[in-house]
Image: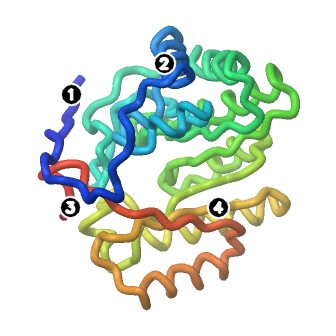
Amino acid sequence: MGRHRAEPLPARKPDWLKVKAPGGANFVRLRSLMRQLGLHTVCEEAQCPNIGECWEHKAATFMILGDVCTRNCGYCAVAHGRPPSYDPGEPERVAQAVAELGLRHVVVTSVDRDDLPDFGAWAFAETIRQVHQRIPGCSVEVLVPDFQGNRESIATVLEAGPEIYNHNTETVPRLYKRARPGGRYERVLGIFRTVRELAPGVPTKSGIILGLGETVEEVLAVMRDLRSVEVDILTLGQYLRPSRDHLP
């Protein structure tokens, strides 16, 4: 198994971006629970600066399918390389964590697993089922990889009944080759067409990273494209360079 994680970037952050060091009671409890259950969060793996605030309010995004990604996007701090074999007991442990934390809404994402036959779709579906079974009334938002556009994998996740189907666009078409070499912009639009066809009533969501070199006009064009495939919710996030090895 191989993995690579870039060294942190020592550049000084602006004053408005500075946050308090995490360490509140809820933060410590959540971190301890994640370690105890052998779970990962994108909050830690992506080095999110808001981790202290979110965890103190018991808000976390679970990252399933391990912590090593088969792709190497230019903006992402998650380790990449050859992932270990998948642990089929993970969905049940995620549901246990959700129950112990008393969450009523949970977000589940993952690394890309191009090495798996279904690209990780079963793990998402089983996590949804386990959470719904253990915590009735808890809503589940899945932030899924592209599954290489595989219709069967998309259907597998939708059949489990997620409350929100989220797949991030990340950037504008011009920057895909540099920022997201394993992805395809047209594939993203195709995914949302498939979701709308298979599950017309499921809200869809996507996100764009700002600060990779895109123009306002390009962002607006992406917004129009996403509306053309009936995406319901869009988030815009600020790019923070994780290290010298990542895109400036």
The foreground one among 63 and 88 is 63
**Distance between mark 4 and mark 2 Cα atoms:** 31 Å
The residue tagged 4 is 205
Residue furthest top as drawn: 36
Residue 8's image quarter?
Answer: top left
Where residue 223 appears, as percent x and y from the top left, is 56, 80
Badge 3 marks a residue whose secondary structure is loop
The residue tagged 1 is 2
Rendered image: mark on residue 247: 3
Mark 3 touching mark 2, by CB under 8 A? no
Q: Earlier in the sequence, mark 1 or mark 2?
A: 1
Q: Residue at x 35, y 59 (%)?
A: 16
The residue tagged 2 is 28
Q: 175 above or below 156?
A: below
- In the image, taking residue 191 as reference, residue 105 lies left or right, namely right
**Distance between mark 1 and mark 2 Cα atoms:** 30 Å
**Distance between mark 3 and mark 2 Cα atoms:** 32 Å
Q: Earlier in the sequence, mark 3 or mark 1?
A: 1
User: Which one is closest to the eye, mark 4 or mark 2?
Assistant: 2
The foreground one among 247 and 230 is 247
Q: Residue at x 61, y 67 (%)?
A: 234
User: Which one is closest to the eye, mark 4 or mark 1?
Assistant: 4
